[in-house]
């Protein structure tokens, strides 16, 4: 994990830790065997996500380089080790949590026409964080 990824992860943890508990709920969605939740706009959504984050083994965070401003409406595709898409969605906020079967995956995130791809290995015992950042527009 490079310095930018660590900084982004640290910012996300601080951001969610500072969120006040709210009444907002975010609905879990499913595609095939994958369950996921997306959001993080506003303190109520961040608090709702914080409450359930340990139920998911992959967390994705989206931001802009430089400003650190969080971004949403990111097109996310996750393919398994056999290159079959297991998730294809648009983020409803800067955070996505997903429940994946243990294994190797390729995550593609597209924002403003720019695609970032990362490989990740997830297991069932801990949450694996990935952060994506795009140049400021």
Image (tube, rainbow, N blue to C red):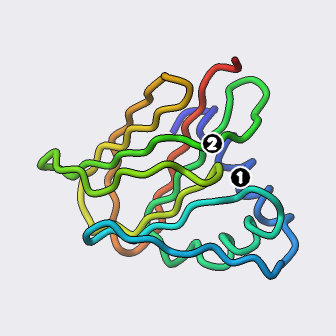
58 and 1: which one is in front? Answer: 58
Q: Earlier in the sequence, mark 2 or mark 1?
A: 2
Q: Is residue 88 above or below residue 119?
A: below
Q: Could you say which quadrant of the image residue 66 lies in?
A: top right
Q: Along the horizontal axis of the image, is 104 left or right of 24? A: left
Q: Nearer the viewer, mark 2 or mark 1?
A: 1
Q: Along the horizontal axis of the image, is 135 left or right of 108? A: right
Mark pair 2, 1: CA separation: 10 Å
Q: Is residue 122 above or below residue 56?
A: above
Q: Along the horizontal axis of the image, is 127 left or right of 92? A: left
Q: Could you say which quadrant of the image residue 107 lies in?
A: top left
- Residue at which label 2 appears: 6
Give the structural element (helix, strand or loop) at label 2: helix
Q: Quadrant of the C terminus?
A: top right
Q: Residue at x 48, y 22 (%)?
A: 114
Single out the residue that lies furthest toward the left. 82
- What is the number of the mark on residue 12? 1
Residue 105, percent across and down? Answer: 28, 50
6 and 136: which one is in front? Answer: 136
Residue 4, percent across and down? Answer: 63, 32
Q: Residue at x 54, y 31 (%)?
A: 111
Question: Tag 2: Cα neighbours inside 10 Å, few (<14), some, or many (≥20)?
Answer: some
Question: Tag 1: Cα neighbours inside 10 Å, few (<14), some, or many (≥20)?
Answer: many
Give the structural element (helix, strand or loop) at label 1: helix
Q: Residue at x 35, y 51 (%)?
A: 88
Cβ–Cβ under 8 Å for marks 2 and 1: no
Q: Along the horizontal axis of the image, is 21 left or right of 101? A: right
């Amino acid at each position: 994990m490079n310095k930018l990824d660590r900084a982004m992860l640290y910012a996300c943890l601080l951001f969610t830790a500072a969120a006040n508990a709210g009444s907002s709920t975010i609905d879990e969605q499913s595609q095939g065997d994958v369950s996921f939740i997306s959001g993080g706009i506003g303190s109520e959504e961040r608090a709702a996500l914080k409450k359930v984050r340990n139920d998911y083994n992959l967390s994705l965070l989206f931001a802009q380089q430089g400003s650190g401003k969080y971004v949403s409406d990111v097109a996310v595709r996750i393919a398994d080790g056999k290159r079959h898409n297991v998730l294809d969605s648009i983020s409803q906020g800067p955070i996505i949590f997903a429940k994946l079967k243990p294994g190797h995956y390729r995550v593609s995130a597209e924002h403003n026409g720019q695609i970032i791809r990362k490989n990740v290995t997830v297991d069932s015992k801990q949450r694996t964080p990935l952060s994506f950042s795009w140049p400021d527009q």
